[in-house]
């Protein structure tokens, strides 16, 4: 049975399309902007460290904030952002109060996401469904007492993180009631209370309540930036409990590696799906092995008609380099093998460098060996570019609303090999990265007038 060879012009078009697909997919990953490592100590022999988040959803949270949105809208978004950075070894849950879920307004608190290990995604989704309630009372103390009872099933260490829009309106002895419950529980407990956009009178009332609770601290957050800063510091503190729990027996956990960082968590089992003009693009991490000093991660990428594997190498500098395996095209099978023959710079710079305005270069040369139906060609693609961290922006995509770091980049791509032709193109790109999630949106345009992009539709990060 004979096979009619593909005309050279058609082959060149296929190669160009596949080549652009490779470059687009790789750049979408290589632009991640921070190296971050969970500098985790050895877990001790205590019970699983636990954190329960409490969000005020009483009617006062429907008031407008200085940030422009309602207080509940801002609090949901910021808390979701912070929850994504939680150490996956934490047992975590979400409790709300004041939603109107219970008829007794002073008992109106609900554990909307029960405590579970590596619970970040479920908590984030639970936050998305929280709306402020219709009734007037705010049972802050009842919610905190219920949270103490939730976590008291194990010995700890435990943390309770509260975001509230004001004081308890149900019981003037709220601080004393919480103190008694904490002493009765007899567990290792830290309580963090953040007052968001409170009046001076409300802030003083909450501060007085917190002062009565052993191991409790209060922080005032008059606007969204202060709320984000307070919750970031709290989550960092709580993560350290998971990193060095010296009170009990070891708890199985995901191993931290140099490929694990907040803006693109290359953990075994992580996956992301994107809606693109070309169809659904999926990334999935098959493995991540090594230590916090040196590691490797294998990621599968698939878009309609094309699939390939990316092999990342990570070190103390961040994501150092990557390489590829075999490229497959649905209509022709295995189409090419690929190899990065040289590279310079770290593709993902160190986290402490990533401040607005910071720029960094990268460069690499990719050789693609094409062999199909008697046709062979070696294409060398040289890529060099510069990336700049622009700042934090609010981004809404099908997967949710995220506070994301915007990164702008320009790549110069030169491909040679087919009949001696040289194809040069400049690509301008913007990527948005949410902590604990990865790329949530990307756009690109070329000097030849084409454009593309993608938006996150779903993800899973263990």
Image: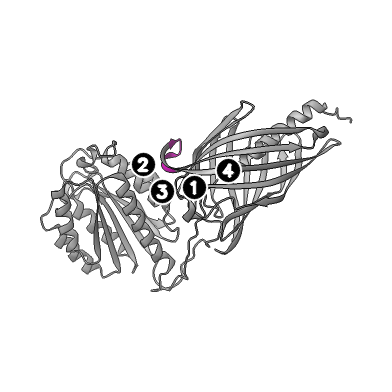
**Residue farthest to the right?**
1
Tell me the magenta residue range.
396-404
The answer to whether the residues at label 2 and label 3 have Cβ atoms under 8 Å apart is: no
Task: Decide which of 187, 369 is in the foreground and name it.
Answer: 369
Of callouts 1 and 2, the N-terminal one: 2
Mark 4 or 3, which is nearer the eye? 4
Check disc 2 and report the residue beneath it. 128
Residue 250 is labelled as none
- Between the residue at mark 4 and the residue at mark 3, the CA separation in whole angstroms equals 36 Å
Q: Is residue 350 visible?
A: yes
Residue 5 percent across, percent down from the top left: 85, 29
**Number of marks in picture:** 4
Q: Position of residue 309 (x, y in %)?
A: 66, 47
Magenta segment includes 399 = yes
Mark 1 element type: loop
Q: Spatial distance from mark 3 to mark 1, Cα to Cα? A: 34 Å
């Amino acid at each position: 049975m004979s096979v009619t060879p593909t005309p050279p012009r058609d082959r060149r078009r296929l190669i160009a399309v596949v080549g652009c697909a490779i470059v687009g997919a790789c750049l979408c990953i290589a632009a991640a902007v921070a190296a971050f490592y969970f500098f985790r100590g050895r877990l001790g022999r205590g019970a699983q460290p636990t954190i329960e988040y409490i969000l005020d959803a009483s009617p006062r949270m429907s008031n407008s904030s200085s940030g422009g949105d309602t207080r509940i809208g801002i609090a949901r978004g910021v808390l979701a952002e912070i929850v994504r950075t939680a150490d996956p070894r934490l047992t975590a849950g979400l409790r709300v109060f004041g939603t109107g879920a219970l008829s007794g307004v002073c008992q109106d608190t609900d554990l909307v996401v029960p405590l579970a290990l590596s619970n970040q995604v479920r908590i984030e989704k639970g936050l998305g469904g929280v709306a402020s309630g219709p009734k007037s009372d705010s049972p802050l103390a009842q919610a905190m007492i219920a949270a103490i009872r939730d976590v008291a099933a194990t010995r700890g260490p435990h943390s309770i993180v509260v975001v509230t829009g004001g004081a308890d309106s149900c019981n003037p002895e709220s601080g004393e009631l919480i103190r008694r419950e904490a002493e009765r529980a007899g567990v290792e407990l830290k309580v963090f209370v953040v007052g968001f956009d409170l009046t001076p009178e409300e802030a003083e009332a909450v501060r007085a309540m917190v002062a009565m609770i052993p191991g409790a601290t209060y922080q005032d957050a008059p606007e969204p930036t202060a709320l984000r800063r307070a919750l970031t510091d709290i989550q960092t503190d709580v993560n350290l409990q998971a990193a060095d729990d010296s009170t009990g027996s070891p708890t199985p956990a995901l191993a931290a590696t140099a490929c694990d960082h907040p803006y693109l968590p290359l953990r075994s089992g992580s996956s992301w799906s994107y809606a693109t003009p070309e169809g659904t693009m999926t990334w999935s991490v098959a493995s991540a092995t090594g230590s916090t000093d040196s590691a490797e991660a294998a990621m599968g990428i698939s878009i309609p008609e094309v699939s390939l594997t990316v092999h990342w190498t990570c070190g103390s500098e961040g994501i150092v380099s990557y390489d590829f395996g075999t490229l497959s095209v649905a209509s022709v099978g295995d189409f090419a093998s690929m190899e990065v023959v040289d590279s310079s710079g770290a593709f993902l710079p160190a986290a402490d460098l990533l401040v607005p305005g910071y720029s960094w270069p990268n460069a690499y040369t990719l050789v693609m060996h094409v062999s199909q139906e008697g046709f062979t060609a070696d294409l060398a693609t040289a890529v060099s570019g510069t990336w700049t961290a622009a700042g934090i922006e609010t981004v809404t995509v099908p997967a949710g609303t995220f506070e994301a770091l915007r990164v702008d980049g320009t790549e110069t791509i030169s491909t040679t090999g087919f009949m001696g032709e040289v194809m040069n193109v400049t690509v301008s790109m913007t990527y948005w990265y949410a902590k604990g999630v990865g790329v949530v949106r990307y756009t690109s345009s070329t000097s030849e007038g084409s454009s593309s992009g993608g938006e996150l539709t779903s993800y899973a990060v263990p």
